[in-house]
Image (cartoon, rainbow, N blue to C red):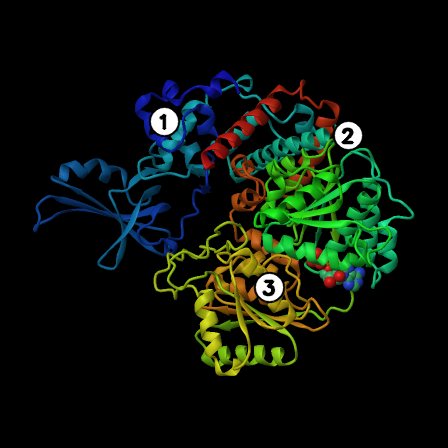
Amino acid sequence: MSDRLAEPLAKSLGARAANPLATMGLETVDDLLRHYPRRYGEPGTMTDMDQLALGEHVTVMAQVARATVRQMRSRGGALLQVTVTDGRHELALTFFAKRPGALRPHEDKLRPGRHGLFTGVVTEYRGTRQLTHPDYVLVGVDADDDADAIDEASRPIPIYPATAAVPTWRLQRAVRTVLDPLTEDDVPDPVPAEVRDRLRMPTRLAALRAVHVPEDAATWQAGRRRLRLEEAFVLQTVLAQRRARAAEQDAAARPPRADGLLADFDAALPFTLTAGQQEVGKEVAAELARPRPMQRLLQGEVGSGKTVVALRAMLQVVDAGGQAALLAPTEVLAAQHARSLRAMLGPLAEQGMLGGADRATTVALLTGSLGAAARKEALLDAASGRAGIVVGTHALLGDQVQFADLGLVVVDEQHRFGVEQRDALRAKGRTAPHLLVMTATPIPRTVAMTVFGDLETSTLREIPAGRSGITSHVVPAANERWMERVWEKVREEVDAGRRAYVVCARIHPDDDAPAKATADVEEMPELLDLDGAADTGRAPLRAVLEVADELRRVPRLDGVGVGVLHGQMAPADKDAAMARFASGDVPVLVSTTVVEVGVDVPEATVMVVFDADRFGISQLHQLRGRVGRGSDPGLCLLVSTAQPGTPAAARVEALAATTDGFELASLDLELRAEGDVLGAAQSGRASSLRLLRVVQDADLIAQARTEAAAVVDADPGLATHPALADAIAAQVDADQEEYLERA
Ligand code: ADP
Ligand code: MG
């Protein structure tokens, strides 16, 4: 950063002006220049005052309609009452003073016909909305001379994220004070000149002027676009460097063998691979055969057959003398993966056992909750190389876990794992292991580029034939007849030999908080507070233990076993509950979102979700993916307490209306802050993205990716791009700071 940008604001503004800015976290010139306007007031376009909410701190663009000074008989003192209008609605501005004379300066300025910006907290007095002692600026009045005034009056007015102590025009003035004297030399540009030229983008300084002091709407739009490109470009450069570094690492080549476990597995496969599985399988096989680490993201809907693809990759590595690790986000899932891998492999996983195949391997399960003896054995299997496949949770990341020759790491449901963990596991091999990340949360292409930008992406688009699909309905919780119908349906399915999940957001009815993870992340429901649900007047969340109790007394479910599953149970109890459900012993399972990811019980056909309106879209989609996995059609019943017409109701209805994961993922992103999207998947990075929107700015992200790749290709160390290197270093610093604060 240049000296000018690093300068403390007190130096250019004086301590009196700088101190309030410091309370907003704005300490240097650079901080202030990155405090971008939230929106722009267009002269002549007034704020729709119908939208003002009581108690809110607002800034409105309006025209003075009338102003009168009155003496107040009752209290003494004087009152200036000004009415401003947006052309349709009116808002009162009220100023009090001891003597009318003290109100004269306001009265002089607030003349009927003038336009201005007014800011204050909205209150109501006798049915009229008002601002008391608002701060304001008048267009064309608060300028130094006439020429300025005319100019000012025609320009968009930047409206900054402000506080009551620092109104937007004070920010504007401060920005002008530091921005006006800057020259191109003061403002290094992380976007290289040739990239700017190619994309026809202005310099960083020009962009700053455009967003802070725009001539017209087109100016600030172009300025913002350029700043978004910069954010995308810096991020993509980081990712390109990561890719380049990974590409330089050595990996052991694991070429396929004609006569190995993989060949045996394929020969015994009871179904034909889908075209997508074959294609991705080829891609993966070729990459494993190279002496550079594969870095691949495999995405596909729940049930699209990712696990088969991963298992085939693992077998290729085992055939080549290496080991594969499969990392799952929860213990339940890890256990389930181990079970299903063993089931798919059959005799091929029964190394050294009676009835095992001649060529066989061992699938070891290593989780935090194993008993001492089992744990020791699993550790030994991993370290000796006896286990070709080791399945576990983040416990696999522990220092005690050694591998004889780790050749491939498969990460299931990556969105629960950060970049750091990925690196930790990768560091476990002598050479860098190949990496395959699987996710069932469909990720739009540009999000994948942003969040998983250091990975290549493969997608399984088809669902294997023979699935019957899922139907979804929204059920209003208050409608008793509908709820009865829900249990009737559950009964019918159970009688037909099938199973039902019932999911609740928390465990105990008397807990205030939703089910918080105890030892594991597995049941942290991603509850939303989108609707400002400060929970006034909303029914409390339904709880697992309470609902299970009720179901045991519902006449329709007489004689039907009802089990529970949640993270506060001992691991052995969890496994037992899952097993009884899978076997059909206890065909109704009331649980937390433990069952969200990956759990595979083909006979499960009904998914009932209580308080569905309080869950995120992608989480509901994941839950829904638990049913309809066998040959019988699935049914998802979303029990909702949302009022019709609210965003929450809209969300649940949208989910019921489509099963297209990509459509839902886009919808989900629109409903969240970008920071959440990125933050959840990749810690840190979010802090550097202020303007970039991962969905809408798809074109910029794609351009930035191409340009960044070319820049890093030509100059991996960025020696010829000091401004870019600085921007990256500053970002990494900020991320680390944030990381430390959170730790
Ligand atoms: P995902 O991991 O993507 O959710 P899985 O790999 O677990 O999906 O596959 C879901 C189910 O479909 C499993 O029971 C699996 O054996 C089966 N399956 C996978 N591929 C095929 C295929 N090509 N044809 C038929 N069934 C398949
Ligand atoms: Mg799976």
Query: In this figure, which residue is indicated by the disc labeled 2?
Result: 250
Query: In this figure, which residue is indicated by the disc labeled 3?
Result: 578
Q: Secondary structure at mark 1?
A: loop
Q: Secondary structure at mark 3?
A: helix
- Chain-order first, disc 3 or disc 1: 1
- Chain-order first, disc 2 or disc 3: 2
Q: Residue at x 60, y 32 (%)?
A: 230
Would you say 523 lies left or right of 385 here?
left
Instruction: Establish if 371 lies above or below 467.
Output: above
Mark whose residue sits in front, 3 or 1: 3
Ligand 1 lies in quarter: bottom right
Residue 506: x and y in percent read 46, 60
Mark whose residue sits in front, 1 or 2: 2
Marks 2/3 in contact by CB < 8 Å: the verdict is no
Residue 441: x and y in percent read 64, 53
Crowding at dot 3, Cα within 10 Å, few <14 / some 14-19 / many 20+, comes out as: many
In the rendering, which numbered label is found on residue 145? 1
